Image (cartoon, coloured by chain):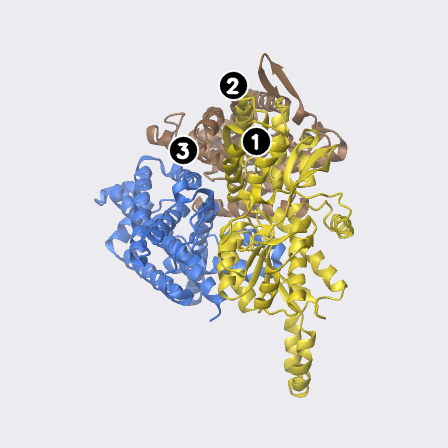
């Protein structure tokens, strides 16, 4: 049972990482920018969820508000920060992105307090279910269900709708897509909007699980997300999903078995470096879109 | 030149320049009588350690106001010169040199973590500046020299006292331990592990997590498998809160014993109903019938919007103790203040009575234990066997 | 000179060495490294262990140089294997691995770090002078490399590996050389840092610090030695200069970082050039 418990933990981490990372990998695929400030979007999502949930008494409304607010923020980052810097080397927008993250983190601290904020009522964090000896918490179920819904929806959107197909085409073959009359600028906004909404959902779920949102909430997750998108082959959604789940599991077992000589936060990067040495192109092979 | 204190030395000096010819004599005689006694204060106001820094700053400001409202010391007012050190070593060295060189400070309270206190201690020691580290737990701080004092129990004594409480008072024999990976968490756990044998405690398994972790799924699953009689965890309230919540959510019902820095009402807020029954070692008794304590509580809550935690209480006490040292030395001369502080006997801290300092200027005082009951910190006894957790001597 | 000024100038000197050495790797040779803190840390630990062991300053400096460059060449080999895109994240990984590994090693002091590092015996002012001399030497080396054949080859590799190959430049060898030299200097800076603080913990060498170094390079103007020197000094002084905002220090710092990049994306060097060229035009 113990190993299954660890697997449950790993899979729920993995799903959370996936929702956090997909936005990053899409931004990278489109613009070649390491969007470090995505962590601030994630944190904003967590804050909005808690604040609105506490104000209205409904956690559902909290998530809804987060899904509405964060895409606006994400698109604003693109418009105001990245767009004017696109013609420079990719490290230029990246440093700007880091600056924004530092600024946002401190802004969260100043506005919402050093101590962080918690849900007034959060029954999910303390509810658990027992499946013949395996304990699964309500939040873990929520994370997995949310990820399943979100990624199924994303898949349908990008294969069944006109806009979605255009989006996918732009990420993999920008010139051809443009020649079919798809506006690449609109695609960029869509990209930031969807990626930010996903990060917000992940942020809200992490808030539920910890019952705490503090200014540093996005910090570690964001660097792990960087490792994940590289593992997934930068720009590939499928690769990112696989990498997220693998990393979740590796961390879950790794914390116990190699935790004595390596930090949990470093495990992701150990996995990354080992994999890159074996398969320099990442999990998903030769695609260099 | 610019600092947070509300005084305006820059203006003062400009005025004195303007009227130099007329006032030269007057100033020379008047200034010393009106000069305040400056106490330097290093505190993390920005960055990841600002949580504790903010509380420390509010508490220190309150202490200074209380002292000045009661007429100051030796007829002079206390002035706090505050600098942000981000709890970082290089920032601590900068601000230490700034306090010494530019502000002419001779007495300092370090309201920051060890990374700051360790770096600042040798700088102050060399300049003959007396420093009280309010809550920095690294042993190096007091080893820097005899001008250094510490107002919190070192990690290893805290751990040893915990082992005594767990093994003897609670009568628990099998524990799993969870350590936070920083100097505070590690040192405290080392003390526990070393003393655990003495009280017949068997440590089933040891786990660790980083300061930034808030999700403990793997550790929780492992502890569940260990099936211990109790769990001992070191950490801060912002790691301890989620940890305890997640342990309880997994259906683990055995007692949880937390380290000193769990001590915050925020811990109860985060862990919610799961906080019930958690023991906190080296906490402080909030219900003690002590007027200063109750007044401090009300006023702090009023200013901060949340209840004071251990960090706030000890920082307040540190500033009060420094003022008390000046009073007993009958001088703000650092060498005399140092001797007065070293000779401290039965000083009333907010946390309880401070017996005094040992030869290394580590505190000698009993350790109180709290347990969370109905969402409130409730006293669960005091560990008074001072010999069981004696701090190291010189 | 006050002790406060001495301590700040010492750190400026150390940061100049770090930024200029990072500029050799990322600016000259185009290999984005966001893990410079790891090499800095490796040098600091090597110097600290040497000082604790035998107390010899020259030996400690040599140990710091060598440790930094060995680690750097290993990472350099990695840079040959992975796509340029991946290198930035790989080096982030190196930084996290370094910190995550060191903090768990009892022989490196674990969480407690290494303390009681013996003083160099030069005093604070003497240390500062030593640091400044090394910083000057680093700048001179950087300027020399920039004008030499090696600098030309670095830039060729950085701009277009394919084209470099047609010129008969073995890009692999030059990447390794860039990493080797740059990280050796980072190691040196680490040694000087250990002399300065006399105790070290892993936290001082984290990823955020590496990003700060990259910020110095980008703000200074990628590839421009003097621009980077100015930016390194500026970014070290900035938090001190805005001390009066106390509570809002990181907020202002982050904001200024964004603003500077947004207004002068080419860095100080480009800005200077623009102004210079504009005034020269009739």
Q: Which one is earlier in the sequence, the residue at label 2 or at label 3? A: 2
- Label 2 close to label 3 by CB (< 8 Å): no
> Does dot 3 land on a helix, a strand or a loop?
helix
**Nearer-the-camera pick, B64 or A272:** B64
Q: Nearer the viewer, mark 2 or mark 3?
A: 2
- What residue is disc 1 on? B215
Q: Residue at x 51, y 17 (%)?
A: A4
Q: Nearer the viewer, mark 2 or mark 1?
A: 2
**Nearer-the-camera pick, C50 or B167:** B167
* Chain given the colour blue: C
Horizontal side of B153 relative to B269 (left or right) equals left
* Chain given the colour brown: A
Give how far apart the Cα atoms at labels 2 and 3 are: 24 Å
Find chain B in the image and tell me its colour.
yellow
- What residue is disc 2 on? A2
Q: Residue at x 65, y 57 (%)?
A: B345
**Nearer-the-camera pick, B380 or A288:** B380
> Does dot 1 land on a helix, a strand or a loop?
loop
Question: Badge 1 local density, few (<14 within 10 Å), some, or many (20+)?
Answer: some
Question: Badge 2 local density, few (<14 within 10 Å), some, or many (20+)?
Answer: some
Q: Position of residue B4 (x, y in %)?
A: 64, 61
Q: Position of residue A223 (x, y in %)?
A: 49, 38
Q: Position of residue C206 (x, y in %)?
A: 46, 45
Q: Residue at x 56, y 39 (%)?
A: B159
Q: Is residue C119 visible?
A: yes
Please, which chain is the residue tagged with disc 1 on? B
Give how far apart the Cα atoms at labels 1 and 3 are: 20 Å
Give how far apart the Cα atoms at labels 2 and 1 are: 17 Å
Q: Is residue B242 visible?
A: no
Q: Are marks 2 and 1 on the same chain?
A: no
Q: Nearer the viewer, mark 1 or mark 3?
A: 1
């Amino acid at each position: 049972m113990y190993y299954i418990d660890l697997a449950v933990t790993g899979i729920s981490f993995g799903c959370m990482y996936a929702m956090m990372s997909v936005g990053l990998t899409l931004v990278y695929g489109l613009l070649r920018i390491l969007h470090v400030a995505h962590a601030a979007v994630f944190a904003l999502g967590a804050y909005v969820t808690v604040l609105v949930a506490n104000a209205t008494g409904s956690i559902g409304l909290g998530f809804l508000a987060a899904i509405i607010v964060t895409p606006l923020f994400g698109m604003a980052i693109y418009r105001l920060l990245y767009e004017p810097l696109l013609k420079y080397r990719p490290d230029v927008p990246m440093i700007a992105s880091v600056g924004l993250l530092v600024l946002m983190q401190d802004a969260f601290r100043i506005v919402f307090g050093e101590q962080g904020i918690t849900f007034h009522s959060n029954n999910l964090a303390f509810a658990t279910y027992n499946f013949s000896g395996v304990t699964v918490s309500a939040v873990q179920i929520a994370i997995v269900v949310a990820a399943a819904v979100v990624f199924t929806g994303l898949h349908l959107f990008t294969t069944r709708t006109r806009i979605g197909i255009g989006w996918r085409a732009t990420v993999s073959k920008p010139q051809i897509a443009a020649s079919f009359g798809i506006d690449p600028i609109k695609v960029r906004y869509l990209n930031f909007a969807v990626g930010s909404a996903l990060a917000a959902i992940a942020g809200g779920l992490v808030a539920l699980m910890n019952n705490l949102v503090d200014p540093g909430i996005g910090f570690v997750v964001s660097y792990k997300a960087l490792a994940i998108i590289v593992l997934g082959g930068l720009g590939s959604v499928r690769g990112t999903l696989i990498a997220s789940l693998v990393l979740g599991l590796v961390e879950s077992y790794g914390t116990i078995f190699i935790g004595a000589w390596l930090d949990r936060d470093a495990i992701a990067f150990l996995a990354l470096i080992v994999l890159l040495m074996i398969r320099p192109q990442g999990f998903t092979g030769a695609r260099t879109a | 030149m610019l600092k947070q204190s509300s005084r305006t030395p820059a203006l003062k000096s400009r005025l004195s320049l303007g009227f130099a010819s007329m006032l030269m004599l007057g100033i020379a005689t008047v200034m010393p009588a009106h000069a305040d006694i400056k106490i330097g204060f290093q505190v993390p106001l920005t960055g990841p350690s600002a949580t504790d820094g903010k509380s420390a700053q509010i508490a220190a400001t309150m202490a200074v106001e209380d002292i000045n409202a009661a007429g100051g010391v030796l007829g002079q007012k206390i002035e706090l010169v505050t600098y942000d050190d981000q709890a970082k070593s290089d920032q601590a060295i900068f601000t230490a040199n700034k306090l010494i060189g530019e502000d002419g400070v001779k007495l300092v309270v370090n309201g920051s973590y060890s990374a700051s206190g360790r770096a600042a201690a040798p700088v102050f020691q060399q300049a003959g500046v007396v420093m009280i580290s309010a809550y920095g737990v690294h042993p190096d701080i007091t080893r820097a020299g005899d001008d250094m004092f510490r107002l919190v129990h070192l990690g290893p004594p805290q751990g040893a006292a915990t082992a005594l409480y767990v093994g003897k008072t609670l009568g628990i024999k099998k524990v799993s331990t969870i350590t936070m990976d920083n100097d505070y968490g590690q040192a405290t756990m080392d003390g526990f592990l070393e003393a655990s044998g003495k009280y017949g405690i068997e440590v089933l398994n040891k786990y660790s997590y980083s300061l930034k972790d808030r999700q403990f799924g793997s550790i929780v699953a492992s502890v569940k498998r260990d099936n211990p009689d109790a769990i001992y965890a070191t950490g801060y309230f912002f790691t301890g809160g989620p940890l305890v919540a997640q342990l309880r959510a997994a259906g683990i019902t055995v007692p949880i014993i937390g380290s000193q820095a769990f001590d915050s009402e925020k811990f109860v807020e985060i862990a919610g109903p799961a906080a019930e029954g958690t023991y906190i070692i080296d906490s402080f008794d909030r219900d003690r019938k002590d007027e200063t304590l109750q007044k401090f509580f009300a006023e702090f809550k009023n200013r901060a919007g949340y209840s004071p935690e251990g960090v706030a209480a000890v920082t307040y006490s540190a500033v009060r103790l420094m003022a008390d040292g000046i009073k007993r030395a009958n001088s703000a001369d650092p060498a005399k203040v140092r001797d007065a502080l070293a000779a401290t006997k039965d000083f009333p801290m907010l946390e309880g009575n401070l017996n005094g300092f040992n030869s290394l200027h580590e505190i000698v005082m009993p350790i109180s234990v709290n347990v969370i009951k109905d969402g409130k910190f409730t006293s669960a006894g005091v560990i008074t066997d001072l010999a069981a957790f004696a701090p190291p001597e010189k | 000179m006050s002790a406060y000024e001495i301590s700040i100038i010492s750190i400026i000197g150390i940061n100049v060495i770090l930024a200029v050495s990072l500029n050799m790797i990322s600016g000259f040779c185009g290999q984005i490294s966001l893990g410079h803190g790891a090499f800095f840390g490796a040098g600091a630990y090597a110097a600290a262990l040497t000082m604790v062991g035998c107390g010899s300053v020259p030996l400690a400096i040599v140990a710091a140089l060598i440790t930094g460059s060995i680690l750097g060449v290993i990472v350099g080999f990695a840079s040959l294997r992975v796509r340029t895109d991946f290198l930035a994240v790989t080096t982030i990984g190196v930084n996290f691995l370094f910190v995550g590994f060191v903090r768990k090693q009892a022989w490196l002091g674990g969480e407690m770090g290494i303390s009681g590092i013996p003083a160099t015996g030069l005093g604070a002012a003497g240390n500062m002078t030593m640091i400044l001399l090394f910083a000057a030497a680093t700048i001179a080396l950087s300027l020399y490399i920039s004008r030499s054949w090696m600098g030309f080859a670095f830039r060729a590799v950085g701009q277009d590996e394919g084209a470099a190959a047609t010129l008969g430049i073995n890009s692999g060898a030059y990447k390794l050389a860039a990493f080797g030299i740059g990280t050796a200097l980072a190691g040196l800076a680490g040694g000087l840092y250990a002399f300065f603080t006399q105790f070290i913990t892993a936290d001082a060498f984290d990823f955020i610090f590496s990003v700060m170094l990259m910020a110095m390079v980008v703000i200074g103007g990628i590839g421009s030695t003097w621009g980077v020197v100015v930016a390194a000094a500026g970014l070290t002084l900035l938090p001190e200069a805005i001390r009066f905002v106390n509570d809002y220090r990181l907020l202002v710092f982050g904001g200024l970082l964004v603003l500077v990049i947004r207004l002068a994306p080419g860095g100080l060097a480009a800005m200077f050039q623009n102004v210079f060229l504009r005034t020269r035009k009739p």
